[in-house]
Image: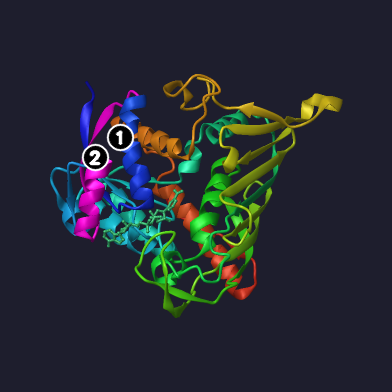
């Protein structure tokens, strides 16, 4: 029987639910070297968090994260709160010797992210950022193909991330549109994911330029604060983050990149699409068709064309633990794969990926994009110390 690892989770809504499901499912599907024990979940509203604890299968609950991170019977803290609390909670968790799984974006800004890296290094704990898209078998397989030289030298990395949930000007001003809580708008919410895919698949980014826009400057305040949707009240408030960002980038290896992220891409729900063009081949991936990787080989001569690889064979990353070929995975399975990877890494005493160092690099890219959007100039991406 594998050893036990006691988990404490903070935040119980969208990501809290996805991660709770992942901790339940991971030992069911994978031979995890550590078995997670879902000790306690934390939220500020006692009635709400108690209900979540019962529904999601947690042994107990807390209403103070400060208390949760100090508990002797917790080994791993999973942080699923809005962005403004990431640094404070993660640093406290590290200081109390807890391993950490933290949702993206890592922090509100680069200086916070640096402090977080310092804290985890000092504490010697394991740390992971919830860039769960890396855990789709197709994307992990794309990484393997690139490492195997299937696309050769990379010339272009092209990415868009389009959603449309705030096109309606009467959609309320939820925390994702409040700079004090979110740090940024489409940039941290959406662009962070495609930047992570770029860093994972195409390498480090050296400089960027960007433009941002806030299309709807005022919105009704929500009747109660909450996640992606909330009912609108009568009073209005100012939207203090970007609604959309478009960025150009140069990579250290000479490749060129483009990034577009918006929550005004009418008709698109969660359309995160990347395309990479190299000297030997090209590949394309769309999160809305998460089991498929499109690949074109330059060697195919006059039979050249994109083919669709269904990444559901047992030989594809993570798939041996799941269903027979062609029996598809969904979005929540990336979180299960993520938890498996984290537990496996902790047991093997190696850093999970993506870890806080990857989060820090991501934050440095976002910082340079934000600066460029403000002053209209190209900005070098700070080479962060890891
Ligand atoms: N990986 C992904 O694809 C993905 C998707 C959505 C959100 N996220 C990230 O996950 C994080 C949470 O987003 P969400 O959509 O789950 O938000 P949400 O609003 O649905 O949930 C936030 C939760 O945090 C709790 N919370 C807030 N402040 C708290 C505090 N001080 N103490 C205890 N609990 C507190 C809230 O009560 C709520 O339960 C964000 O950083 C977001 O960027 C990641």
Residue at 22% from the left image edge and 42% from the top image edge: 58
| Rendered location of residue 300, percent (x, y) | 80, 25
- Where residue 181 is drawn, which disc sits there? none
Does the CB distance between marks 1 and 2 fall below 8 Å? Answer: yes
| Rendered location of residue 108, percent (x, y) | 41, 64
Number of numbered discs visible in the structure rendering: 2
Q: Is residue 154 left or right of residue 67?
A: right
Residue at 65% from the left image edge and 46% from the top image edge: 253
Q: Which one is nearer the viewer's eye here, 279 or 269?
A: 269
Q: Looking at the picture, does residue 283 appear above or below residue 209? A: above
In magenta, the rendered stretch is 30-57
Q: Quadrant of residue 281?
A: top right
For disc 1, the marked residue is 24
Which of the two discs, 1 and 2, labels the residue nearer the N terminus?
1
Q: Looking at the picture, does residue 247 appear above or below residue 280? A: below
User: What SS does tag 1 mark?
Assistant: helix
Residue at 72% from the left image edge and 38% from the top image edge: 278
Q: Nearer the viewer, mark 1 or mark 2?
A: 2
Magenta-drawn stretch contains 53: yes
- Where residue 57 is drawn, which disc sits there? 2
Q: Which one is nearer the viewer's eye here, 196 or 340?
A: 340
Residue at 18% from the left image edge and 44% from the top image edge: 74
Callout 2 crowding tier (Cα within 10 Å): few <14, some 14–19, many ≥20: some
Q: Looking at the picture, does residue 379 appear above or below residue 276? A: below
- Quadrant containing ligand 1 reads bottom left
Q: Which one is nearer the viewer's eye here, 159 or 96?
A: 159
- Any part of residue 76 in sight: no
């Amino acid at each position: 029987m594998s050893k036990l690892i006691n988990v404490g989770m903070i935040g119980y809504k969208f990501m809290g639910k996805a991660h709770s499901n992942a901790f339940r499912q991971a030992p069911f599907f994978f031979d995890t070297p550590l078995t997670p024990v879902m000790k306690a979940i934390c939220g500020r509203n006692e009635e709400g968090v108690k209900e979540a604890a019962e529904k999601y299968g947690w042994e107990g609950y807390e209403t103070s994260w400060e208390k949760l991170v100090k508990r002797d019977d917790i080994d791993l803290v999973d942080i699923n709160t809005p962005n403004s609390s990431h640094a404070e909670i993660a640093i406290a968790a590290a200081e109390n010797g807890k391993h950490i799984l933290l949702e993206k974006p890592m922090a509100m800004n680069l200086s916070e992210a640096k402090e977080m890296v310092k804290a985890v290094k000092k504490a010697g704990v394991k740390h992971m950022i919830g860039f769960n898209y890396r855990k789709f078998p197709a994307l992990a397989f794309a990484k393997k193909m690139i490492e195997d030289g299937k696309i050769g030298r990379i010339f272009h990395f092209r990415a868009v991330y389009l959603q449309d949930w705030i096109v309606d000007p009467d959609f309320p001003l939820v925390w994702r549109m409040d700079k004090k809580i979110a740090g940024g708008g489409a940039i941290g919410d959406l662009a962070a994911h495609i930047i992570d895919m770029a860093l994972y698949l195409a390498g480090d980014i050296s400089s960027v330029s960007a433009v941002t826009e806030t299309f709807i400057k005022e919105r009704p305040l929500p009747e109660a604060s909450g996640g992606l949707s909330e009912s609108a009240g009568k009073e209005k408030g100012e939207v203090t983050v970007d609604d959309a960002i478009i960025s150009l980038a140069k990579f250290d290896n000479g490749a060129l990149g483009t990034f577009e992220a918006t929550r005004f891409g009418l008709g698109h729900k969660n359309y995160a699409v990347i395309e990479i063009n190299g000297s030997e081949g090209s590949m394309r991936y769309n999160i809305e068709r998460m089991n498929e990787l499109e690949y074109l080989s330059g060697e195919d001569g006059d039979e050249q064309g994109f083919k669709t690889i269904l990444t559901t064979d047992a030989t594809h990353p993570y798939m041996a633990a799941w269903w027979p070929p062609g029996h598809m995975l969904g979005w929540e399975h990336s979180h299960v794969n993520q938890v498996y990877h984290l537990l496996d890494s902790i047991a093997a005493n190696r850093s999970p990926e993506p870890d806080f160092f990857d989060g820090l690099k991501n934050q440095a890219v976002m910082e340079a994009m934000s600066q460029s959007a403000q002053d209209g100039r190209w900005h070098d991406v700070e080479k962060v110390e890891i």
